[in-house]
Image (cartoon, helix red, strand yellow):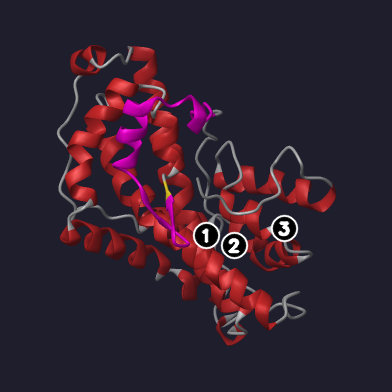
Amino acid sequence: MTVLSEITEAEATGEIAAIYGEVRHAYAAPYVSSLLRHLATRPGLLEWIWQVMRPAFTSGALQHAGWSRVDVSGLPSLPPLSAGELAGLGVSRSDIALIDTVCRTFTRVSPVNLVLAGCIARLVTGQVELCASAPEPADRPLPAALPQLPGMVPWEQCDAGMRATLAVFQTDLAGEAFVPGLYRILARWPGYLARVADDLGPMLRDPAVCGECERVADRIVDATPEILAGLKPPASPPPLDEHGVKLVLDALATYRGTSPQMAGFGTLLLDALPQH
């Protein structure tokens, strides 16, 4: 199972831990995404990024830019599931609320990260001419923070049947097989995940649908210039040499490869739940 190197929330200390706390508040989500945990492994980089990007987060401009651009109208919807159907799949009414929270969390975090990744890519490559070309945006209120998520099902605890189901959601991450965390958490409800695999699996392999997911993500990333326009240019260059810039861009591209599923398919899963 492929994962990027990272400083976990439990391992974080000092300024990194303080930034992680601000990130959780800014995202109104219960965790710090793997993208930021990975960037934190590069000395001084997350601190440099956060110094530049913090105003866009504290105003809520970046978050709302990402959330407002999620448009799944071009994607085929998933069959709606009633509470009775979900009960037959081993999902109780309280489980429905938990699954709703899981899907809502991933769809909340992913659009924000897509905009942030677009900004970082421009900043580390020196495209600072985009900064400070427009007034700072007005403050936008954030939604209530989402509750803590259940953990992902450990791979070693998955039997052959579950591994086969998870393989339906397998994607390429830096040239290796990877199953996005959304589905690893939903594996706590094997019957439900199997149904999702039946409904969503064909779409995951449909070039037209995958292309539309890319357009969903591209529309979100297109908010990058408007966010940078309201920020001050960095006071110093990024703490990266040429090779480090390449590695960061590779990491951003890796994250970009899995984000369309979270922004697009995660929204479809949310919409298919009852009482949404």
Segment tinted magenta in the rendering: 149-177
Q: Which is nearer the eye, 161 or 64?
A: 161
For mark 1, give the secondary structure: helix
Is 160 magenta? The answer is: yes
Q: Residue at x 26, y 28 (%)?
A: 194
Circles 3, 2 touching at the beta carbon (< 8 Å): no
In the image, 170: left or right of 139? left
Under mark 1, the amino acid is Ala
**Residue pointed to by mark 1:** 61
Front label number (1 vs 3): 3
Residue 166 placement: quadrant: top left
Q: Which is nearer the eye, 246 or 225?
A: 246
Please determine whether, in this image, residue 87 is positioned above or below residue 44.
above
**Alpha carbon distance from label 3 to label 2:** 23 Å
Q: How many marks?
A: 3
**Alpha carbon distance from label 1 to label 2:** 5 Å
Callout 1 crowding tier (Cα within 10 Å): few <14, some 14–19, many ≥20: many
Q: Residue at x 59, y 54 (%)?
A: 4
Under mark 3, the amino acid is Thr
Q: Position of residue 132 (x, y in %)?
A: 61, 80
Pick whichever of labels 1 and 2 is earlier in the sequence.
2
Q: Residue at x 51, y 29 (%)?
A: 156
Residue 56 is marked as: 2
Pick whichever of labels 3 and 2 is earlier in the sequence.
3
Residue 41 is marked as: 3
Under mark 2, the amino acid is Ala
